[in-house]
Amino acid sequence: MSELEIKLSRSNRIYRPDEPLQGKIITKFSSSVSHYGVRLSVNGSVNLQVRGGSAGVIESVVGVLKPITIVKRSVEIRPSGKISSGTTEIPFSLILKQPGERKSGKFYETFHGEDISIQYLLTVEVARGYLHKSLSATLEFIIESEKGGFRVSGRIPTQCSLSCALRGELTVEASALPIQSIDIHLLRVESILVGDRIASETSLIQTTQIADGDISRGLTLPIYVLLPRLLTCPSVLAGPFSIEFKVSIVINFQSELSKLHPKSDPRTPRLWLAMETLPLELVRTR
């Protein structure tokens, strides 16, 4: 009987990219086993796919997309030799982010979604040559971003006169990832009472860019948005219908994922952006 197991130093299996991945390989053999080396591999990737019934932009392009490699590394833990019978523990320590790799890195947090999955796997293999099948075991571990990776502060009104501009300010205090752009989206929500239900549709009516490229941390950016006259009106909450508005602050990060979806819907949360949406009441003051 042969058993092979990977046991990490942390029971929750959560690590950050700049921390060593430590643990031990446990073998349980009924007799000694000759081998041609014990290798440990770490593989991290972003997998894109459509599960049954999905539709939209992702479905039209997913057929030509390949998994995005985040990390792929292999090290020899033991050279050729023998592993004794009984239980043997082989300690290991593996560095995920190599010295010299840029701070921003490309280590996304572990995520399991419908169309996007970000996964990190640790695999051990005991090579036994052509006459014997190699022994292997795989374990998933979880990656979380470095502490204090992102923090933004600012102010923006939730009520605005149609005869005035929407004014505010925003400051990026910290961001581990470089920023690609910061946009202010003006959204319109139209709702109609149909029988006993409400049919509602949200549409993007205007985008104002307030930053292009990675900005200095701590720099206060002014927000100044002119409201489009023909596409806005005072907010209406009537019985059979309503016309409401929202404002979204969207921060896009420089990411390989964002390049794959350059025309993605800005109303939909994505892995490569941070978004905060607030209700906006529009009024006529004069």
Image (cartoon, rainbow, N blue to C red):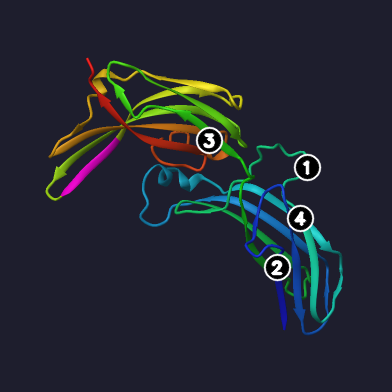
Crowding at dot 1, Cα within 10 Å, few <14 / some 14-19 / many 20+, comes out as few
Structural distance between the alpha carbons of marks 4 and 3: 30 Å
Residue underneath mark 4: 94
- The answer to which image quadrant residue 2 occupies is bottom right
Structural distance between the alpha carbons of marks 2 and 1: 25 Å
- The answer to which image quadrant residue 150 occupies is top right
What quarter of the picture does the N terminus occupy? bottom right
Residue underneath mark 1: 99
- Dot 2 or dot 1, earlier in sequence: 2
Reply above or below: 214 against 134: above
Range of the magenta residues? 197-202
User: Marks 4 and 3: which is nearer the front?
Assistant: 4
Label 1's element? Answer: loop
Q: Position of residue 220 (x, y in %)?
A: 54, 22
Residue 259: mark: 3
Reply above or below: 121 against 195: below
